[in-house]
Amino acid sequence: MNILIIMGPPYSGKGTQCEFLKDILNYKHISTGDVCRKETSNKTEIGLLLSKYEENGDLVPDSTMKTLFGMTLDENLNEKGIILDGYPRTIPQVDDLLELIKERNLNVEKVLHIEVPKEELLVRAKKRAATSNRKDDKDEHTHVKRIEVFENETKPAINYLATLMSVDTFDGLGTIASITNNIKSSLIN
């Protein structure tokens, strides 16, 4: 099984691109946010722990994410490939992910990074809040906090990951189709 990692700030269009890429590649899209929300709604032990972090826009502790992601990987070992959306988000999570992958003899095919300016992210956050049924999208303070957490935690993780393997960066402005085409071209090369 190959692993494609897609990274970027909240509201950058990662999930949208994953939906197109899963069909193009015949890979399974694994949104860490969706996995966390499923655990939370099912009120599992790990889900109860996750809910307090998500509601405040905070990152879930790395050790909890490693456990959750290890379970998720094991559940999907028969897939041709998976697209990771939302993991890793911190430098320790990068190391955790690489350890989990190595333990299972898996391969990171490519790392994609979508960049979008903060001002545009806030505009997109408001649009998504108007159409989404997610409670974590309703509070503007949470929008700002999620972007700040990305800048402080995930952006350094992307930079760290780039020291370990190739990370292809894409401009997240423009049409969805043009962004998809740019990503698709990088996957073919």
Image (cartoon, rainbow, N blue to C red):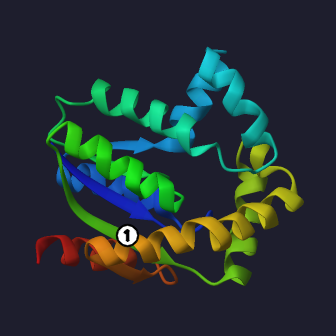
**Horizontal placement of 9 versus 104: left or right?**
right
Where's the N terminus, which quadrant? top left
Residue 165, quarter of the rendered image? bottom left
How many numbered discs? 1
Which residue is labeled 1 in the image? 161
- Mark 1: give few (<14), some (14-19) or many (20+) Cα within 10 Å: some
Task: Determine the residue positioned at 41% across, 57% down.
Answer: 94
Residue 18, quarter of the rendered image? bottom left
Instruction: Relative to 129, say whether 181 is above or below.
Output: below
Residue in front for this viewpoint, 38 or 127: 38
Amino acid identity at mark 1: Leu
Residue 105, quarter of the rendered image? top left
**Horizontal placement of 68 versus 64: left or right?**
left
Q: Position of residue 68 (x, y in %)?
A: 48, 31
**Horizontal placement of 135 versus 19: left or right?**
right
Residue in front for this viewpoint, 96 or 141: 96
Task: Determine the residue positioned at 75% across, 72% down.
Answer: 122
Q: Position of residue 126 (x, y in %)?
A: 78, 64
Could one spot residue 149 in this view of the protein? yes
Task: Determine the residue positioned at 58% across, 34% down.
Answer: 36
At numbered mark 1, what does the secondary structure look like: helix, strand or loop? helix
Could one spot residue 27 in this view of the protein? no
Where's the C terminus, which quadrant? bottom left
Residue in front for this viewpoint, 180 or 27: 27
**Horizontal placement of 30 versus 102: left or right?**
right
Q: Position of residue 86 (x, y in %)?
A: 50, 53
Instruction: Relative to 179, say whether 50 is above or below.
Output: above
